[in-house]
Image: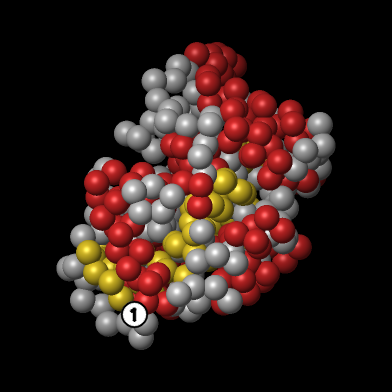
Amino acid sequence: MVTFLAGGTGTPKLLDGSSEVFGPSETTVVANTGDDVELGGHLVCPDVDTVLFHGGGVLDTDRWWGIEDDTTTTDDELHRLAEAAGFDGGPRYLSDDAQTGGREISRWRRFSGVAEFMEIGDKDRAVHVTRTSLIDEGYTLTEVTRTLADAFDLDIELLPMSDDPVASIVHTEAGAMHFQEYWVHRRAEPAVEDVEFRGADDAEPTDAVLTALSDPVVIGPSNPVTSLGPMLSMDAFRDALDRTPVVAVSPFVEDTVFSGPAADLMAGVGYDPSTAGVAEAYPFADAFVLDTEDGTALDRPVVRTDTKIDGPADAARVARAVESALAEVS
């Protein structure tokens, strides 16, 4: 059995070829929920859904977001109506009172659907409507995720990191904003000053997650701050990682990041934006997989391979390196 921690696109890309190394029936994926948003009343779970859609064979792998060949009729009409009414297309946060009202799981990340700032496809939206409606019926996010996994015929177990709300709030020179505003709307342009995981002090990983963390854990080449940070902000989650073998794949080649805003976010919270900084952020990691061009010296076992992932064959190669690293520390 092995458990992957998934956030952003790094770990899902690794999963694209991991079935050749780790059997799907023996694989659990714990997904980040810190960058979830409630948009127009519907709970959107981007990192959960990337794994859900990928496992279901419908993920748009050009964007690593949404459903392939999805239509956007509703999104288009929302923008037409907003333009006709004189509203702009920027994020429209609900009021402070509304941020902590309504369903608890949506706290601190509630946006109006007027001129929605994240493009949601029509089939994609059906998933969010189903998820939100089941939560309103009294199901937990974990229970809803399992229901959706069954609907997409996933052959792995997919778990959200918690049934409690944790929101990734990026503090920038332009003010504090939810991660999705920082990344999707502002394209990571404001300088990062800090990152807050709001709600983490009161959040707990579920029993199912803690059970999964008793197996060897793999952290793919994900963003250490906003993809893994929300999970690590829960004390019980971090404590569980201290007790189990953990292998991490660096999203850097020395100080060059493969993609995304990881470098800016790491610098903003005080880590060196490099493989060395990733190792500092992951003191619980027992071994690392680094690129063959990455000469970073670490105080833990290292397995090197070409870590660039452009498809299933690349992912399988990196997964075999992960398997070798796990063998050294298990």
Above or below, 21 relative to 266? above
Give how far across and how far down residue 266 sits, in percent: 42, 67
Q: Which of these two is toward me, 28 or 275?
A: 28
Give how far across and how far down residue 173 sits, in percent: 49, 59
Which residue sits at x=39%, y=38%? 64
Q: Which of these two is toward me, 226 or 242?
A: 242
Question: Which quarter of the picture shows residue 234?
Answer: bottom right
Q: Which residue is mark 1?
A: 301
Which residue sits at x=42%, y=30%? 57
Mark 1 surroundings: few (<14), some (14-19) or many (≥20) residues within 10 A: some
Q: Is residue 86 among the parts visible in the rendering?
A: no
For residue 63, side relative to residue 194 (left or right): left
Above or below, 287 relative to 200? below
Above or below, 214 relative to 61? below
Q: From the image, which quarter does the C terminus lie in? A: bottom left
Give how far across and how far down residue 201 sits, in percent: 72, 66
